Image: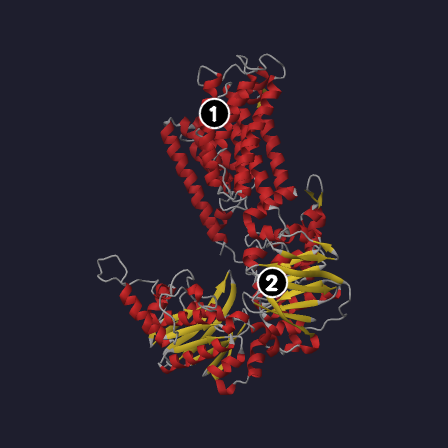
């Protein structure tokens, strides 16, 4: 590295300028970790209960299903898309899966096959809706925003209608114990859903970083035309990304449905902003080509920490919503600022 | 004091300086020829003058008053019009609508309708000034390139321009259209309009300009009355070296083994009956004007565009149409003319760019699990081979590189596939002279190793320096083939200017 400066021709020189501290902090990958710590410490004097085992356990159990779903969203954001239909997929998988498993009038009531069949059904519903989204986006070249907005409305409606066919109430209860335990069971205080989330996280991490498919997803998000010219089968990859997103929503649905012990059409109704927000807070760019599993996990951590602390402070649900909205907006602004800054 | 004074202008992009302290003056009624290689800073300095870019340092004055345009609108208001190489006209609108698109006059200020009569009258006046004898309501799409150029001039005149910048105005014009343009430029000069004329065609500059300014690597190398500059002197000042130094010799000659065979390629509206072969160790040049069908031919061969009839064969195997991956697997590599839009992921590190077309060849088939070690080693090896002057390929983003280094990244990413056929579409566009010579060297090594190269370039000199054979295309057809012994800049240009239908009309 001795004669480095001599090797650089004048017009080809790359200049490295030491950025001011605030810029380095803003551009840091681990900005969110820093924010979490600062926020946590700042909250201790206001709500001391935040530093309790109970709160930690609450935070963890709130995080797990959200992580699984937000990771699916991350995959879509990486290709510069967006999947608004995840909440509808959660609802649809929940009610259809529950109708297969339920002990009251379900086709497999009481059978030991009920749980595996139910899980497969839920994954199938997720994959199918994801497949349809992907088909429209990848092959019919429709904007993902439009497609997934439409499927959201459609399947949210269908989920409610489906419940009225299968049940006299607004949800489908009496699910097998072996299913419910996935969402709420624990051994030595460690929830089973932790293992599910870890499995999904590791799988997606490996897919994104170590496989041709994953690297090509980043390329598509970075520059679709360049990818095409470089031989990436763009449509096939985009299609598959939406299937993965659908599957993640379905796995999330398994955890949520298990926790609630019922299949409900409104099960994921309020978490859409959390899903996208968590990914963006973590640092995944809305303009595509950037994203990491660990970032999204940290984004989820921050959102859930915020949520818990605000609830501990006794704020109303509406206040919690407003504050979360403001934080996600701030994250989006930070995302834009980072894009601008790193452009200099 | 000169009418326009430009003093000490400097500008950097992403920390890479592209202009250092450039200054020149322009009187009213004077024609300044501005020359320099691609990437020498001509367009940047003109974009600053035209208000598109803002300088980092330096100042400009018009008639002694400070001139610091924040937008091209500001520039227009101060009487500076910029006629770009790619014309800014709406083909689907009429001439008169194009002339007034910036602000249609109204019969009464409060009445939101267009005063068609006034537009018609004014357009007729303007068309008269440029001697274009067509009705003002003619759609621009029905005009030839030369006529469109004249409409652009009329547009400049309509804003009462005091200074008009012409950027390569003749690239897509026929000889007759060029003569007409020059007459009009002379008339504008007589009316006291100052003109900055940018061109690669030095003979034209010699013929038109009163003074010349030469840029190289973002610096003003020399300026003075045209009498002091012969064409030879202009070239050596622009290039900073003689032609023979720029094009290194190539060892080994072409073989008779045909690698790429293109037969009767036809796609209506684009190209017609294009046929040629390229052998191992041969460089075939495609010469022609913008829109002659050169890039279209290249894109069709690589599978980026469909075609109606004909065939493409690599080593005897016919390729499926419209299938870039099949072309890649058959051994074709394609360097696109649009480096930023199609060649690179500007926001990704160099390493990711290098890896992109090579992921499949470095992965285990069923899972697509990438062998990161060999991929990284290959990427390192290739970045050294193309002398990529970047500190760390894993962290430096493509957009922070100079044009030359960016182009080397594109070259390297394809070289990693060890192609049998390499299509180079404008490989040195927007690249400084030093990097140009390096790119030529890389291509030569490649050819010596037996690759067949199809090279497209708008610079005939470059084709003459690099190719074994040159095809001249115009209007989507191959007009002439030149062997090395017959290379002659004038004759190649002439063949490329053959403009069949249009010349007759």
Give x and y (percent) for residue B316. 75, 57
- Picture quadrant of residue B456: bottom right
Residue pointed to by mark 1: A159
Q: At x 48% / y 83%, what residue is drawn?
A: B224
On residue B25, the disc is: none
Looking at the picture, tell me which residue is in the foreground, B357 or B308. Answer: B308
Mark 2 vs mark 1: give the one in front. 2
| Residue position for label 2 | B272
Count the marks: 2
Question: Is residue B25 depicted above or below A42 in this figure?
Answer: below
Relative to A318, is B459 above or below? Answer: below
Question: Looking at the picture, how far across and down is residue B133, in whole percent?
Answer: 38, 74
- Report in which chain the residue with disc 1 lies: A
Q: Is residue A147 above or below residue B149?
A: above
Q: Residue B127, percent across and down?
A: 36, 73
| Residue B438 appears in the picture as rendered | no
Q: Give neighbour class at mark 1: few <14, some 14-19, many 20+ (Cα, 10 Å).
A: many
Residue drawn at x 51%, y 62% is B15
């Amino acid at each position: 590295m001795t004669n480095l400066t001599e090797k650089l021709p004048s017009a080809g020189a790359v200049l490295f300028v030491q950025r001011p501290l605030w810029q380095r902090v803003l551009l840091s990958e681990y900005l969110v970790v820093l924010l979490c710590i600062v926020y946590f410490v700042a909250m201790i004097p206001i709500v001391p209960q935040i530093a309790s085992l109970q709160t930690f356990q609450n935070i963890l159990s709130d995080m797990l299903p959200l992580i699984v779903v937000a990771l699916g969203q991350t995959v879509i954001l990486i290709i510069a898309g967006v999947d608004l239909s995840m909440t509808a997929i959660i609802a649809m998988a929940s009610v259809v899966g529950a109708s297969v498993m339920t002990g009251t009038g379900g086709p497999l009531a009481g059978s030991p096959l009920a749980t595996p069949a139910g899980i497969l059904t839920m994954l199938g519903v997720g994959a199918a809706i994801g497949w349809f989204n992907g088909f429209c986006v990848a092959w019919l070249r429709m904007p993902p925003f439009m497609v997934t907005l439409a499927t959201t409305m459609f399947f949210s409606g269908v989920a409610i209608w489906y419940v009225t066919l299968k049940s006299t109430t607004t949800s489908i209860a009496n699910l097998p114990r072996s299913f419910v335990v996935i969402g709420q069971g624990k051994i030595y205080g460690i929830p089973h859903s932790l293992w599910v989330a870890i499995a999904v996280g590791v799988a997606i991490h490996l897919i994104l970083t170590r496989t041709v498919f994953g690297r090509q997803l980043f390329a598509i998000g970075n520059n679709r035309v360049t990818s095409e010219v470089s031989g990436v089968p763009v449509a096939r990859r985009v299609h598959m990304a939406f299937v993965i997103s659908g599957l993640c929503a379905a796995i999330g649905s398994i955890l949520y449905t298990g926790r609630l012990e019922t299949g409900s059409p409104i099960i994921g109704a309020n978490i859409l902003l959390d899903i996208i927000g968590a990914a963006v807070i973590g640092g995944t760019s809305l303009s595509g080509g950037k994203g990491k599993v660990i970032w999204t996990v940290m984004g989820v951590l921050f959102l859930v920490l915020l949520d818990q602390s605000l609830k501990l402070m006794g704020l109303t649900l509406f206040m919690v919503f407003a504050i979360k909205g403001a934080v996600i907006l701030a994250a989006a602004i930070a995302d834009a600022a980072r894009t601008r800054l790193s452009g200099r | 004091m000169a009418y326009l004074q430009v003093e000490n202008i400097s500008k950097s992009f992403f920390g890479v300086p592209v202009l250092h302290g450039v200054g020149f003056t322009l009187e009213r009624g004077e024609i300044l020829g501005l020359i320099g290689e691609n990437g020498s800073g001509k367009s940047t300095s003109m974009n600053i003058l035209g208000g598109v870019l803002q300088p980092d340092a330096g100042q400009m004055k018009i008639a002694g008053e400070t001139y610091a345009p924040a937008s091209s609108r500001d520039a227009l208001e101060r009487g500076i019009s910029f006629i770009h190489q790619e014309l800014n006209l709406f083909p689907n609108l009429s001439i008169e609508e194009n002339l007034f698109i910036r602000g249609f006059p109204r019969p009464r200020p409060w009445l939101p309708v267009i005063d068609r009569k006034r537009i018609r009258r004014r357009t007729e006046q303007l068309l008269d000034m440029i001697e274009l004898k067509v009705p003002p309501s003619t759609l621009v799409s029905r005009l030839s390139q030369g006529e469109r150029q004249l409409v652009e001039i009329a547009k400049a005149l309509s804003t009462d321009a005091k200074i008009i910048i012409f950027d390569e105005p003749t690239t897509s014009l026929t000889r007759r259209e060029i003569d007409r343009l020059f007459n009009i430029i002379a008339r504008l000069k007589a009316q006291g309009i100052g003109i900055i004329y940018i061109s690669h065609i030095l003979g034209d500059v010699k013929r038109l300009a009163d003074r010349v300014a030469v840029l190289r690597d973002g610096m003003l190398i020399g300026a003075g009355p045209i009498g002091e500059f012969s064409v030879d002197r202009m070239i050596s000042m622009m290039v900073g070296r003689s032609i023979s130094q720029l094009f290194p010799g190539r060892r080994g000659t072409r073989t008779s083994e045909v690698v790429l065979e293109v037969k009767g390629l036809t796609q209506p509206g684009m190209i017609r009956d294009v046929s040629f072969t390229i052998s191992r160790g041969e460089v075939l040049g495609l010469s022609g004007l913008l829109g002659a069908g050169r890039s279209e031919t290249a894109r069709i061969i690589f599978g980026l565009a469909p075609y109606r009839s004909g065939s493409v064969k690599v080593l005897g195997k016919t390729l499926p149409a419209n299938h870039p991956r099949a072309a890649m697997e058959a051994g074709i590599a394609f360097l696109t003319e649009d480096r930023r839009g199609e060649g690179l992921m500007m926001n990704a590190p160099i390493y990711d760019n290098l890896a992109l077309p090579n992921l499949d060849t470095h992965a285990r088939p069923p899972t697509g699990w990438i062998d990161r070690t060999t991929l990284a080693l290959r990427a390192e090896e290739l970045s050294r081979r193309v002398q990529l002057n970047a500190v760390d390929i894993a962290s430096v983003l493509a957009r922070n590189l100079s044009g030359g280094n960016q182009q080397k990244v594109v070259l390297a990413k394809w070289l990693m596939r060890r192609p049998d056929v390499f299509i180079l579409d404008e490989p040195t566009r927007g690249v400084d002279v030093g990097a140009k010579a390096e790119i030529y060297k890389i291509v030569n090594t490649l050819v010596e190793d037996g690759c067949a190269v199809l090279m497209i370039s708008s610079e005939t000199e470059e084709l003459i320096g690099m190719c074994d054979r040159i095809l001249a295309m115009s209007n989507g057809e191959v007009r002439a083939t030149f062997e090395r012994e017959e290379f002659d800049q004038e004759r190649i240009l002439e063949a490329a200017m053959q403009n069949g239908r249009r010349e007759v009309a």
